[in-house]
Amino acid sequence: MAYVCSQCHTRLEGQGEGGTEPPHRCTTCGAEAGLEKEKGVPPAMRYFGFVVAGAAVAALSGSIVSRLAG
């Protein structure tokens, strides 16, 4: 299991068999507290990315069509 240091945002792997135990401290900054389990991208953020990408594609295709139409 992967962990992230909340102070310096370094990605760390778990210790023990199967990596289930959190590391005792961050290898970069030495912080002993604030090591959190790594989480995936929240769905709301993912949907917002799709909306922004869709708006960019619509704007780009609209500008291309308007240039071709003259």
Image (tube, rainbow, N blue to C red):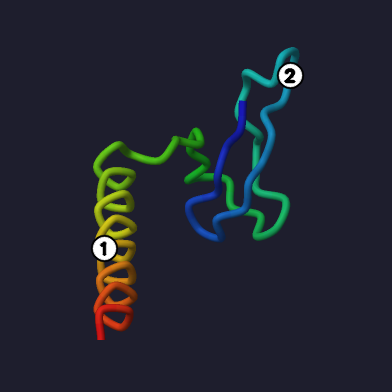
Instruction: Indicate the secondary structure of the residue bearing disc 2.
Output: loop
Rendered residue at 74%/19% (across/down): 16
Q: Is residue 36 left or right of residue 48?
A: right
Image coordinates of residue 8 in percent, x first then y, are 56, 60
Residue under label 1: 58
Q: Residues within 10 Å of mark 1 (few under 14, many from 20)?
A: few
Is 50 located above or below residue 3 in the figure?
Answer: below
Q: Amino acid at mark 1?
A: Ala
Quarter of image, res 17: top right
Rendered residue at 66%/55% (across/down): 30
Is 47 located above or below residue 53 in the figure?
Answer: above
- Pointer 2 with pointer 1, Cβ within 8 A: no
Rendered image: mark on residue 68: none
Is 16 located above or below residue 56 in the figure?
Answer: above
Image coordinates of residue 50 in percent, x first then y, are 31, 49
Q: Amino acid at mark 2?
A: Gly
Rendered residue at 44%/36% (across/down): 40
Quarter of image, res 42: top left
Rendered image: mark on residue 16: 2
Rendered residue at 25%/79% (across/down): 69
Q: Is residue 28 left or right of residue 55?
A: right
Q: State which quarter of the image contains the C terminus.
A: bottom left
Q: Is residue 26 left or right of residue 57?
A: right
